[in-house]
Image: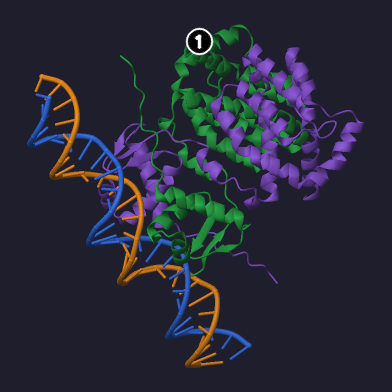
Chain colours: A green, B purple, C orange, D blue
Amino acid sequence: MVELELKNNSRRKTLVDGVEDALLEYFKNNNLKPGDSIPNEMELAESLGVGRAVLREALSRLKVSGMIISRPRIGMMLSEPSLFDGMSKCINPLLMSEKTLLEMLELRMVVEEGICSSIFLNITDEDIAELEEIVGLSQMTGAYTYTSIAEHQFHTKLYQITGNSSIIKFQSIIYPIIEYVKSRYKDAFRPIELELIKSGTMVTHEELLNHIKAGDLEGYRKAVGNHFEIYRTYIKKVRSKNR
Amino acid sequence: MVELELKNNSRRKTLVDGVEDALLEYFKNNNLKPGDSIPNEMELAESLGVGRAVLREALSRLKVSGMIISRPRIGMMLSEPSLFDGMSKCINPLLMSEKTLLEMLELRMVVEEGICSSIFLNITDEDIAELEEIVGLSQMTGAYTYTSIAEHQFHTKLYQITGNSSIIKFQSIIYPIIEYVKSRYKDAFRPIELELIKSGTMVTHEELLNHIKAGDLEGYRKAVGNHFEIYRTYIKKVRSKNR
DNA sequence: TTTGTCTTATTTGTCGGACAAATATAAAAA
DNA sequence: TTTTTATATTTGTCCGACAAATAAGACAAA
């Protein structure tokens, strides 16, 4: 039996889609910047040749990211959109495929490995003191596992050291996904963890911190890699199975 | 005179905002998954106690990420949202502050440094051959500068090697920002570049590829860091100035 | 029975009008 | 001059109507 993947993907572009594009185009072409005001709804609808309802549905979309802000009597104006605000609305792990979930898990590891240099570049004595406190107060549920609060505190602090608020925000958005993945695939992670413990690959927060205190970037980076080796192994296993 | 920073930031939550939240809540509470159909507009509007227009403005927002898809007569159903689709609509560098622009530039560097291990883990001989071809055909505009096409081809290929489509998509979305930043701050980058050339820090794509071919992860990672040192230096300079 | 065509009912898509709510601006009052 | 009030404008919300698309059932033809 042939699986005739028809799946009418050609969802006819609706008027609202077109208006949304037209608005974005309009902003670009007219070189509009944050703070600039834009014509009122009546004018826009008329000049675009659509009803006010359609225009408002398009505007509504542009409001989620903060690109457009509006107030009665004042009108509408452009503002700096938040790149990640739209994303945060989509964060419902129940709606995400296993593929996406694992991809986001990997992306998180990528970012955490990628910020290593930035951490060593920006870290202060206060940061180290704070990390020490976090590690000291961390409750562990196993030799190498932490409560989710401790886990979250430690890694969040690492991101904060970068001083890059976009990166911090990005991390805070995808963190719920990570937690979900960890709990959902707990049973699959367990045997991998045991093996890694046996081979001495597992790394604690304390060890990570020691590398930081020693100013050993290379060692830290490698330790971070090992800290996440459990997930990398699982991802590799799933990928090879699905091939 | 006190600048009474009132700035009505408490943009009163509109009905549409509330309905949007209510819908997301509803999906979660009822454990709805992709493929599940949801009540029609009339029912939803009625049960939420709002007019159909308001409901549709909220639905419109959830349609941009693909979380909801709808067709006449069929109704609406849930689908897997695209985490980055909403973001791509916000990519208009003209609307982004300098701070955000530089943060995104840094995020890009973070990701590119973070995917190093993944690249070495997944790379195939075909990938290397393709990289060689790209490097071979690359047109250079200076000793260490490439045409934007060559630049784009090379780095895009690196992301593709990870096999992580979310990461690939993320890169493709923020790439326009990077290009914009590079052209906008061209004059500021130039003196830094000269210094880095003098100190022998600059790295070509060819050298990066050599590390890959040699299977030298550590050397590659360091080279990637140097490849972006020009931007890191600039970011550091701007940050210290703004402090 | 099977296949193709037509009709119908349902749901989203779009429009227009109406009024409520908010508030900058101007006018009036103190 | 300062305060209060009125007004006009713009977004926010609701309602009703019709168009467009199409799944499902009825019907006709082979």
Q: Nearer the viewer, residue C28 or B58?
A: B58
Give the quadrant of the N terminus of chain B: bottom right
Mark 1 residue element: helix
The structure residue drawn at horizontal position 72% and vertical position 18%, both measured from the top left corner, is B132
- Which residue extends farthest right? B198
For the question of whether residue A234 can be seen, the reply is: yes
Quarter-wise, where is residue D27 in the image?
A: top left
Image x and y of residue B129, in percent:
68, 15
Residue B92 x/y as whole percent: 61, 48
Tell me the chain of label 1.
A
- Image coordinates of residue A81 in percent, x first then y, are 57, 50
Image quadrant in which you'd find residue A208: top right
Q: Which residue is mark 1?
A: A191
Q: Which residue is at 89% across, 28% downward?
A: B200
Residue displayed at 77% across by 37% down? B232
Q: Is residue B119 left or right of residue B190?
A: left
Three-letter code, disc 1: Pro
How many marks are shown on the rendered structure?
1
Crowding near the residue tagged with mark 1, few <14, some 14–19, many ≥20 C-alpha atoms within 10 Å: few
From the top left corner, tell me how far across and down residue A35 is, in percent: 61, 61
Work out whether B136 lies above or below A91. above
Comparing B208 with A110, the one in front is B208
Determine whether, in the image, residue A80 is placed left or right of residue A178: right
Above or below, A191 against A10 in this view is above
**Residue A214 in view (yes/no):** no
Q: Nearer the viewer, residue B108 or B152?
A: B152
